[in-house]
Image (cartoon, rainbow, N blue to C red):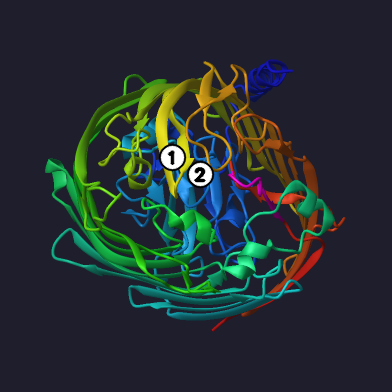
Amino acid sequence: MRWRVPVAVLTLGLCATAQAGDVVTTALEPITVTATRVDASAFDVPAAIDRVGLDAPALGASLAESLQSVPGVLARERQNYAQDTQIAIRGFGSRAAFGIRGLRLLLDGIPATQPDGQGQISHFNLASADRVEVLRGPFSTLYGNSSGGVIQLFTADAPAVPQLGLDAFASSEGDRRFSLLASGYGAILGYTDFRTEGYRDHSAAQRQSFNGKLAVPAGAGGRLTLLVNHLSAPDAEDPLGLTRQQFEADPHQTTAVATQFDTRKSTRQTQLGAIYEKDFGNLGAMRLLGYGGQRAIEQFLAIPVSAQASATASGGVVDLDSGYAGADLRWTHRSGPLTWVAGLAIDRLRQQRQGFENFIGSQTGVRGALRREEINTVSAFDQYLQLDWALTPRFSTLAGLRHSALRFDSQDRYLRSGNGDDSGRVRYEATTPVAGLLFKQSSAVHWHAAYGSGFETPTFAELAYRPDGAAGLNFALAPARARNGELGVKLRLPRDTGISAVLFRADTRDELVTASNRGGRATFANAARTRREGAELSLQSSLTPTLDLALAYTLLDARVREAYRNCTGQPCSSAQTLIARGSRLPGVAQGQWFSRLQYAPAPAWQLAAEFRYLDAVPVNDVNSEAAPSYGVFDVEASWRLPSVRLSLRIGNVLDEQYAGSVIVNEANGRYYEPAPGRSLLAGVELTL
């Protein structure tokens, strides 16, 4: 079975190419920029890249709703807004217990991934968004550290005629969203207020976000774009995960320690950006991006009081105040069949981290005594070059090279007896090449192959402590290195039909695993070789003038290639558990399916049905447990007039009980985060 599906995918591509011949189609391929950094059709790029529009009626609480149709992407709602959406691309990022790891995230070119590789998308405002682009495979390495894949959200451009849009959505699970969108005169402004009572106990949350873009001419051949973004998410309750027994008994419940310590997180972020673009004619074009922002987080954890007795414990309350800034300067030049892009990128993060006890006397869930204080900075300086060369009318190549240098510096300001000075600094460097070849068999059939290498540094959280208990950063940690290749075919057929089939493999060494977990400190080490290989298939087609079909399938076999020892449970003083060769990587499903059938019997009406299936997902390194496989069926209907759209969606029609996400390697065995049963979502959208 491991090889049958990839062979079937490739066979499908061969059969389709034989039938396609020199078919001429009038379908226009959407323009993307993430893979090449210049306007290009995804059909003409030797990379797996998808562009997803954001016009469908949805709750709009997170980007996960829009990523379901992208093969190779596993985006999972946690029903926990104190934690970010879980996203993995071809298995990269699946180990993240919180936040998003191993992927590069961008909003209008501004990184949402910190220089050390930790990212979040909670500030992505979907009300003002036009599209999201997802780049998978080797070419994602052109975005530097932690580039297992790239996800970039783009704010819409202002229309020529000023518009005002209002929409409101509410669900039977207590979710409510209100959005306001104003656009015109070169500006677009989006505001969203989202509130939820929570599907589970102790999971209420609210978010207010604002995103704005203003684009104006700036001299002859120049254009200036100003960006502003703000997020406020106070006191989002954290229901934590459930054990398998708790999950099966009552998925609505939370664990006792969640209410005992009132686990919750507050986030506030503001960022500004500016993009200046100027065309110098035959000399080329310049693009300069500058940005800066501030992000503050306060999080109350369920760390037992007894575990904080150790002199090295960091407490149970995390207080982070992060200032970040950066710039990206690039030059693009076109000369006949050759286009080259050269650029420099600088990113800097300065983070003040404090830890406090989560108790005062017998009262828990409050900020107590200081237990940790440090200033962490990480700076990244990258240089990149990429060439797009049309070798012949049928063959073209896209190649690139990026050099990254990162410096981590930690200044420990909490020195006590038994808690030494953990200050230190470390530097990482890597040069990551990639190359791809595109063969245009005909106007309807394009083949591509690509190969590249990438790397992923440890984050500050993983560098913080040494397994031997000595003071200072864990200088022994090395970046994980990956070799990444893919072979694919893209088809453009009549009836606006597009088919894409890809075979891929990524071999990684020096992945990070837990070396110890004791006294309130988790340490990490490099271990094992892993392999992620599989196939992706997607299809979009207008079967008839009123009937559209979208399919996406992913087969992913992600396994350990070399046995290693890991630390499991808590407390754990050393890595003693053997992880055997052939073990599946946790958080990764072997099979994933998405299908959507959309019927528009009249211009004003639209009916749709969706089906999603996910194979069982291992929840820990030893593969002792797995979240069961599931299939979910949704239906929706919408009625559109010139200035109003009404929509209704029934989610999980068959009331399937399943884990919407998992917390990988959760030390207490609370791996499972349940998804809602049958639910109803209704919305109204007005355009003035």
Q: Position of residue 544 (x, y in %)?
A: 76, 47
Above-or-below relation of 511 to 628: above
- Along the viewing direction, whichever of 341 and 125 lies nearer the viewer: 125
Residue positioned 25% across, 41% down in the render: 472
**What's the mark number on residue 102?**
1
Q: Is residue 678 left or right of residue 191?
A: right
Q: Position of residue 397 (x, y in %)?
A: 35, 23
Residues at circles 1 and 2 in contact by the CB criterion of under 8 Å: yes
| In this rendering, the label closer to the viewer, 1 or 2 | 2
Q: Residues within 10 Å of mark 1 (few under 14, many from 20)?
A: many
Outermost residue toward the right? 654
Label 1, label 2: how far apart the Cα atoms are: 8 Å
Residue positioned 42% across, 58% down in the render: 154
- Along the viewing direction, whichever of 478 and 174 lies nearer the viewer: 478
Name the residue beneath numbered marker 2.
Answer: 96
Above-or-below relation of 417 to 445: below
Q: Is residue 554 left or right of residue 96?
A: right
State yes or no: residue 668 in magenta.
yes
